[in-house]
Amino acid sequence: MNDVLKSLGRALASLGAPGILWLMLWPLLVAVVGWGVVAYFFAPGLVAAMEAWAASGSLPRWIPAAAITGFVGWLLVAVTYLALVVVTTGIVLGAFSMPFVVSHVARQDYPGLERKRGGTLLGSVTNGLAAFAIFAGLALLTLPLWVFPVLWPLLLVGLFAVLNTRVFRYDALSEHASAAEMQVLAAHNRAGFYALGAITAALGLVPIAGFFSPVVGGLAFTQYGLRRLAALRGHAERA
């Protein structure tokens, strides 16, 4: 947990570096505006279709009709919108911004770390789409729980912790780690990565600050991933 907190602290400090905030922010703005336009035109019709489907009695028995009607229907649309924003931001970051951000972090804090380029742009896109598919599956499985407002914060943090971890972990490691190292780090540091995912997901629920949660997430996962990669190689060299 100490490494997680240190990575968050360094991520926040990195926001003050020239150009870093804008490199991390513009993909988020593109995703927010782009999906916002889509939601403006299609969200009302989607909610109406869900309500009609629920009223028709076509739902599985284990999903109460109230789960996708009224306010909860709009909440599910909002959660889907946020998930698409996170995934799109992650894909755009991986394609355009993360290489510069990772280079900045590596140059500043891990200058001797060799680049083994275990990830690719196609891998980043595929990973983002897979992350959204997992998110959607988990959201569907937990659908009956959305009728209980007291559970909404826990559900949101849990779902977005998985999404954030899946999206940002790959891009944070793809430049410096080999494919084998990426698998080892994901398996051996699962708790740390998901702790970061949960913290950044919780940050997303805070007004105003939540807007910057993908920015902080990208930087924090880079700090943590490179820190654990350096430790892994250090252990391997001493073995």
Image (tube, rainbow, N blue to C red):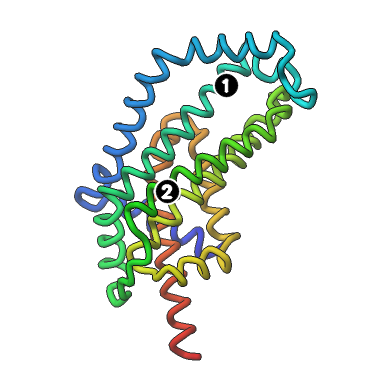
Is residue 183 positioned above or below 171 on the image?
below
Q: Residues within 10 Å of mark 1 (few under 14, many from 20)?
A: some
Q: 209 or 224: nearer the eye?
A: 224
Report x, y in % for residue 56. 70, 9
Quarter location, residue 137 = top right
Q: Secondary structure at mark 2?
A: helix
* Residue position marked by numbered label 1 in the rendering: 75
Q: For the point 60% across and 17% down, which residue is it? A: 73
Q: For the point 69% across and 20% down, which residue is it? A: 67
Is label 2 in contact with label 1 (beta carbons under 8 Å)?
A: no
Q: 23 or 141: nearer the eye?
A: 141
For marks 2 and 1, give the CA distance: 27 Å
Report x, y in % for residue 208. 41, 30
* Residue position marked by numbered label 2 in the rendering: 126
Report x, y in % for residue 51. 63, 11
Q: Is residue 27 left or right of residue 171?
A: left
Q: Nearer the viewer, mark 2 or mark 1?
A: 2
